[in-house]
């Protein structure tokens, strides 16, 4: 079973109620304008009110309140706007889905915001590892004729390439890798200018708000969490599926029947394990799922299935993440490979949980970006949520029924 | 006082002292960079010594310049201490000495202001200290009374200093090569496929 | 005002001077990188500033809140 999509641009994109409404008409500008008209120019105050009315949170994984970023960027001089299409998570395909089917919604959101901030450029950061999505977004940019300039950048295609500071570095023509941020980039980003950098889906929501208004936005979702969000559901052997769901709906509605009964990972490679009962009863909600111990983050649900050993899956992911370190921060590029080895020890039943926890403590929050933290989150969730599996392996067996652990390890 | 051999001896002596001090400073600088676990001296001591010895060499350089200019036996003007061309006395070798002084000045000033500078910039300027050392030694060999022939007093110290700096340079290049190997390019996302 | 010693991780090369000068709150991890275990209190402020100045990579900052 391969968790990494073999062809990241082959995605099943399901039509949805808001963002993905009308995608069957095609991604072109003409079809988009037929559905939506030209966006009205907004002042910064109007835009601020719009996003605050629905409590818009970022969709890049941190769920940061967009209004706060907008305010920070608005306070400074010569702000710039950045659209980040490099999904932070390998298993996420929602930004590619938007690039393929709804690029102009993303661009309308970014362009309107840029004009409100009196910024003269919108920087669009395309994913270097998803050439088809990048090409479609390029084509969409070429169709447009906005008052602001659309500047294109292409990432280097690593796991950490989409990280905010790594993107700022890319725009400043340095290697596309994270550096330490002493201030948030909304205050001091590209060339020390206020940089409003958000995920493509966030911009799509801004676009929707600008084109349709807050009242219409609030028709979906709940009172405390209005609107919808994009989820990527990955199961072995199938293409990743992107669904648009309203907040408050049942997560189970988008999970395939074949996944029932087995645990899954919510959030992606930097996510958390959750048992099947948790998944089955969960409602799609940022605070809700965080309180269940399975934060939504970038909206990825990985379902390895009933024949997969969760320790094997975790070991594979951690080994992959260890190789994806930017190799800039000592605790990360030394600690993650050591952690991968320790997790493999749990898989083979020879290692100690104490060693794993020790390494988690040494690696977390000691780096320029959240790469080590995310990896630790996944490992800690394994220990916390799937304790039975860990114990079983220590006694030489596996709950999935794989009897020869050393052989199953590769 | 401007006549007679005293100033001349002070000049030659201070020249030798500068070479030795700068050599020790360069070696200490290289030792600061290498991470050797179980080293006997704490790193901050090595670093402080490197810095203080370099500053001492500035003092020795001041003596060297003042004695050269004040000595009426040779015609060296004040401005020739900082401008490397236009001297009448041994223009090439004196010019090299002046160049070494200029380079040392840049390195020392940027280091005193290190915390206010971007680290990358400071680091690149600091590389000039190797050039400064080499140019200074060339100046000594070309203009130096004590290096006129192989029986000169300064021959052994010079050979030892050159040997020390060449060794330090080789060690430093070795560290650079080791760092390059350790920081091989990060893997691309699509390089790894999880086994079925 | 509580002060924290923060490390600029991509710049740090594990030279260890910070641990030598501020052992009260800086230990070293198994790979030689600094493990900051406490706040910079008033009595440690002078030593902390010395550590910041001494770092050969200028990879330390005292951040207050």
Image: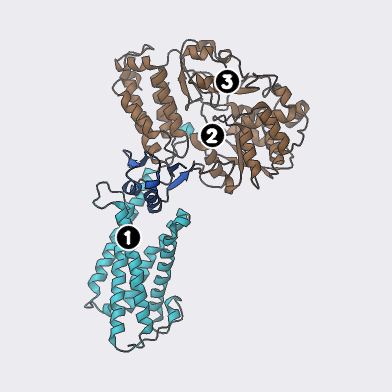
Chain colours: A brown, B cyan, C blue
Q: Nearer the viewer, mark 2 or mark 1?
A: 1
Element type where label 2 sits in the image: loop
Vertical order, A351 against A66 (above or below):
above
Residue B169 % position (x, y): 32, 59
Label 1 to label 3: alpha-carbon separation? 59 Å
What residue would you read off at disc 2?
Answer: A129
- On the question of residue B54 being in view, the answer is yes
- Closest to the observer: B169 or C22? C22
Q: Chain of mark 2?
A: A
User: In the rendered structure, are the residues bearing label 1 and label 3 in contact, judged by CB atoms less than 8 Å apart?
Assistant: no
Vertical order, B95 against A336 (above or below):
below
**Which residue is the extreme one toward the left?**
B151
Count how many numbered circles sit on residues in the image: 3
Disc 2 crowd rating (10 Å Cα; few below 14, some 14-19, many 20+) is many
Do circles 1 and 3 both sit on a common chain?
no
Labels 3 and 2: the sequence-earlier one: 2
What residue would you read off at disc 1?
Answer: B50
What residue would you read off at disc 3?
Answer: A285
Residue occupying image coordinates x 28% and y 22%? A350
Label 3 to label 2: alpha-carbon separation? 30 Å
Q: Chain of mark 3?
A: A
Vertical order, B12 against A376 (above or below):
below
Label 2 to label 1: alpha-carbon separation? 47 Å
Compared across the picture, whether A132 is left or right of B160 comes to: right
Disc 3 crowd rating (10 Å Cα; few below 14, some 14-19, many 20+) is many
Do circles 3 and 2 both sit on a common chain?
yes
């Amino acid at each position: 079973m391969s968790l990494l999509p073999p062809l990241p641009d082959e995605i099943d994109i399901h039509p949805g109620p808001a963002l993905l409404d009308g995608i069957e008409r095609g991604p072109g500008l003409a079809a988009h304008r037929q559905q939506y008209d030209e966006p009205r120019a907004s002042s910064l105050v109007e835009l601020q009110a719009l996003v605050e009315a629905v409590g818009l949170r970022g969709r890049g994984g941190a769920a940061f309140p967009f209004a706060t970023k907008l305010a920070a960027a608005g306070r400074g001089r010569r702000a710039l706007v950045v659209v980040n299409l490099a999904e932070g998570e390998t298993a996420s395909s929602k930004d590619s889905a938007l690039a393929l089917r709804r690029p102009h919604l993303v661009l309308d959101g970014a362009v309107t915001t840029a004009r409100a901030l009196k910024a003269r450029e919108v920087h669009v950061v395309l994913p270097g590892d998803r050439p088809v999505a990048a090409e479609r977004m390029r084509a969409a940019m070429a169709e447009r004729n906005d008052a602001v300039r659309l500047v294109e950048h292409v990432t280097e295609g690593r796991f950490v390439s989409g990280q905010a500071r790594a993107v700022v570095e890319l725009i400043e023509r340095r290697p596309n890798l994270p550096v330490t941020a002493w201030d948030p980039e909304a205050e001091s980003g590209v060339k020390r200018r206020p940089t409003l950098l958000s995920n493509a889906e966030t911009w799509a929501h801004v676009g929707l708000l600008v084109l349709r208004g807050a009242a219409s936005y609030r028709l979906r979702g709940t009172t405390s969490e209005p609107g919808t969000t994009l989820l990527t559901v990955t199961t072995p052997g199938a293409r990743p599926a992107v669904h648009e769901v309203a907040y408050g709906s049942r997560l189970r509605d988008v999970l395939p029947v074949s996944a029932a009964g087995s645990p899954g990972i919510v959030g992606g490679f930097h996510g958390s394990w959750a048992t099947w009962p948790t998944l089955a009863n969960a409602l799609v909600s940022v605070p809700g799922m965080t309180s269940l111990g399975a934060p939504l983050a970038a909206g990825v649900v990985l379902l390895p299935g009933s024949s997969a050993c969760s320790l094997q899956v975790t070991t594979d992911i951690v080994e992959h993440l260890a190789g994806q370190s930017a190799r800039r921060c000592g605790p990360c590029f030394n600690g993650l490979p050591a952690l991968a080895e320790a997790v493999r020890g749990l898989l083979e039943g020879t290692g100690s949980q104490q060693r794993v926890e020790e390494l988690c403590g040494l690696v977390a929050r000691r780096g320029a970006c959240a790469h080590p933290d995310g990896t630790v989150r996944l490992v800690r969730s394994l220990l916390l949520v799937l304790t039975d599996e860990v114990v079983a392996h220590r006694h030489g067996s596996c709950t999935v029924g794989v009897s020869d652990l050393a052989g199953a390890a590769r | 006082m401007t006549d007679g051999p005293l100033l001349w001896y002070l000049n030659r002596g201070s020249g030798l002292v500068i070479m030795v001090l700068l050599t020790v400073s360069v070696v200490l600088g290289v030792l600061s960079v290498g991470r050797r676990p179980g080293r006997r001296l704490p790193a901050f001591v090595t670093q402080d010594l490197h810095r203080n010895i370099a500053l001492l060499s500035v003092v020795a350089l001041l003596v060297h310049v003042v004695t050269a200019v004040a000595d009426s036996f040779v015609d060296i003007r004040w401005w020739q201490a900082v401008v490397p061309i236009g001297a009448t006395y041994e223009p090439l070798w004196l010019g090299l000495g002046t160049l070494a002084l200029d380079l040392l000045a840049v390195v020392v000033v940027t280091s005193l202001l290190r915390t206010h500078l971007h680290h990358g910039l400071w680091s690149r300027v600091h590389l000039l200290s190797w050039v400064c050392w080499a140019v200074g030694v060339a100046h000594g060999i070309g203009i130096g009374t004590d290096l006129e022939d192989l029986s000169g007093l300064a021959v052994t110290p010079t050979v030892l200093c050159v040997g020390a700096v060449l060794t330090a340079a080789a060690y430093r290049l070795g560290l650079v090569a080791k760092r390059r190997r350790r920081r091989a390019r990060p893997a691309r996302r699509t390089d790894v496929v999880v086994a079925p | 005002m509580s002060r924290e010693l923060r490390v600029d991780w991509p710049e740090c090369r594990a030279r260890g001077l910070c641990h030598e000068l501020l052992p009260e709150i800086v230990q070293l991890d198994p790979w030689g990188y600094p493990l900051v275990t406490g706040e910079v209190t008033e009595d440690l402020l002078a030593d902390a500033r010395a550590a910041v100045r001494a770092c050969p990579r200028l990879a330390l900052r005292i951040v207050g809140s």
